[in-house]
Amino acid sequence: MSKTLVAYFSASGVTKKLAERLADSIGADLFEIVPEKPYTRADLVWINPKSRSSVEMKDRSCRPAIASKVEDMSQYDVIFLGFPIWWYREPSIIDTFAESYDFSGRTIVPFASSGSSGIGESGGNIKKLAKDSDTKEGQRFKAKASAEELKAWACEYL
């Protein structure tokens, strides 16, 4: 029997709510990607070129550390990977996550929260890092996406 994981990073709580609704609606396990060094409000000020998030996003090799790991990734066949859109792509901590596991033979389905920006090339970026995975393009959702909408979308991959 296949198992599904919803793993997510949320800086402000929006992606967390989406991830919880998604996991609940499809009966998946839930894992929060928590940075070893939490982001402060000042870290997230995108108009400040010296803020932590701005610096990380300018350096494509940046890999913020994650505080904990999924104990047994091998038990999951499908991983829904959620994040906010930062600078038209996935945050660098998602790159850390994608490089941290053996995703061979697993399906990764990105989902993002954003008020207006699309998911961009996030799916392609993740596919390059999560070697031998079947990473999908993914989809962006508004903060208030319903459980029914999320479930209908997710069921395409289950």
Image: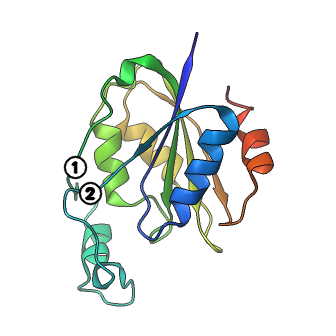
Q: Is residue 74 above or below residue 88?
A: above
SS at mark 2 in the image = loop
Which amino acid type corresponds to the residue marked 1 in the rendered image? Ala
Q: Secondary structure at mark 1?
A: loop
Please name the residue shown 68% across and 30% down the image. Answer: 157
Q: Residue under circle 2?
A: 35
Cβ atoms at labels 1 and 2 below 8 Å apart: yes
Residue 149 place in picture, x, y as percent: 79, 49
Q: Is residue 149 left or right of residue 51?
A: right
Query: Is 68 situated left or right of 72 in this image?
Result: left
Say which residue appears at 45% left-offset and 38% top-offset: 127
Quarter holding residue 54 = bottom left
* Residue 67 badge: 1
In the displayed structure image, the side of residue 151 where residue 44 appears, left or right:
left
**Earlier along the polypeptide chain: callout 1 or callout 2?**
2
- 3D distance between C-alphas at marks 1 and 2: 5 Å
From the top left corner, tell me how far across and down residue 121 is, in percent. Answer: 52, 54
Q: Is residue 120 visible?
A: no
Which residue appears farthest toward the bottom when viewing the image? Answer: 48
From what the image shows, is residue 2 above or below residue 90? above
Amino acid type assigned to the residue bearing label 2 in the image = Pro
Quarter of the image with the C terminus is top right
Of all residues shown, which one is farthest toward the top? 1
All told, the count of numbered labels is 2
**Quarter assignment of residue 142:** bottom right
Q: Is residue 63 left or right of residue 33?
A: left
Residue 136 occupies quadrant: top right
